[in-house]
Amino acid sequence: MTYGTPISLQQAIQVAVDHHQAGRLNEALSVYRQILAFDPTQFDALHLSGVVEHQLGQHSVAVDLITRAISENGSIPAAHHHLGEAYRALNLSADAERSFQAAISLDPAHAEAHNSLAIVYQSQNRTDDAIASFERAIAERPGWSSAYFNLGLALKSQGKTTAAIKAFHDGWDVDGRSVEAASQCVGTLADALREGFEGYPNVVCSGPVDLSFSIVFCSIDDAKCRNATALYERLFANVDHEIIAIRDARSLAEAYNRAVARSRGDIVILSHDDIDILAVDFAARLAGCFDQVDAVGAIGGENIAGPRWSSCDHPHLSGWITHRPQPGMPYHVDLVSPRPRRANMMALDGVFLAARRKVFAKIRFDESTFDGFHLYDIDWTYRASKAGFRLGTAGDLLIVHESRGNFDETWRLYADRFCDKHQVEYRPGTNALFYEQPLDTGDQVRRFFGHLTALDQPVLSSA
């Protein structure tokens, strides 16, 4: 680097730091080296050039530079931590341990040093010490997903399944984009259930249901119509309800408008005809949703970034659903969030929608624009949210859907209509939408989601 006009040493360091923070490592290193040519003892240049060398894979060089920096100023915890990382990369665990301990002695709240020390302990098969250090890192930085993930792996290695699942869940919860924590949470719990782990079963809601319900579905298949009718008759056996089966729908928007107009319930349910519901207390559980929201679905997104509820991507998605193509096949639990419920959503999937009558009275389905069987749901829920109604997800309703949807050219036609109507850009959504695991039985599905629901409550031990 050649300076056109004289600048101070601190200005030169800032230039290097700007390169470093922008990921221009070679440019940063060049400036750091020029500073050191001027002042070989300058702490920041020694320390940060060592960090760059470590990032470039030159770990021995990094050790030399950071050691020299510490000799100039040994009271900077970050330097000791970075020295430990360079030692760890060289598989010098004893030297790494001493460096991390030095960082902690200077700053007991140094979460990164506690986490790194725990990783060293793991490499030394000192799992109990590792767990304690990961827990200390989390205590110092409660929102650090990676520390929860690392803690989960350590607990899992000791066979502490319940505590490991909770750690992975907490890591996913504090960072909805943490693919590693989410995958481990879902996978560890599913593996354990398939091996006989009982987990925490769903807590059954009890007490009277004071609301009345109108249950609407469209069906041209006699068997599906009978099955859907029997399902809802069973679930609402002791609740005031009516079932409206539309057998001649011209579109879902047209059929739902027609059914809502003739319905009488406080709550109107719009359901596909190819679903099952595993929550034995479904009516009470659904009724409880309306203490917080005006409309609810199993799964959705909290903003609109395209013509799919999933277009806004993680961490703005919420809900749980299960897929099972046909009886006798495995269930596939599918999750987009660690918690089942979230309010203030803007788009809900139409496999199952329920809303207070006042929402349907104000917001009708657009049967002119959506004169087929796609996008009616995203359009209606988006307009309802913009009108001030509060929408939410309730994945703990335990809905099982036979179909995963059909995003063909017909769907694309209606997606374009949606984008034109609402002036949003077409976005197809993420390829890695669901965190999915197969389970063998409906009871395993209930226990799977029951355990995740229990993680919201302070009932789990560390055993």
Image (cartoon, rainbow, N blue to C red):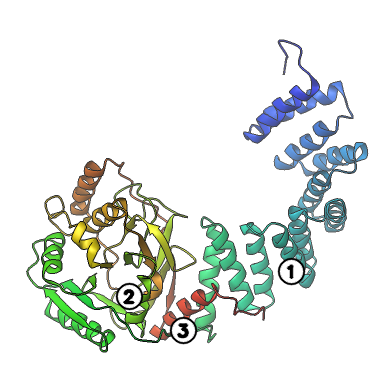
The answer to whether residue 377 is left or right of residue 178 is: left
**Residue at point 33%, 66% (across, down):** 296
The residue pinned by badge 3 equals: 203
| Relative to 10, 302 lies left or right | left
Q: Amino acid at mark 3?
A: Val
Quadrant where the N terminus is found in the figure: top right
Residue at 14 percent across and 76 percent down: it is 244
Disc 1 to disc 2, C-alpha distance: 38 Å
* Circle 3 crowding by C-alpha within 10 Å: few under 14, some 14–19, many from 20: some
Q: Residues within 10 Å of mark 1 (few under 14, many from 20)?
A: many
Residue 100: which disc?
A: none
Few, some or many residues within 10 Å of mark 2 (<14, 14–19, 20+): many
Q: Nearer the viewer, residue 12 or 243?
A: 243
In this view, which residue lies farthest toward the right? Answer: 71
Residue picked out by circle 2: 400
Residue 131 circle label: 1
Within the image, what quadrant is residue 121 found in?
bottom right
Say whether disc 3 or disc 1 marks the residue closer to the N-terminus: 1
Up the image or down, 102 lies above or below 402; here it is: above
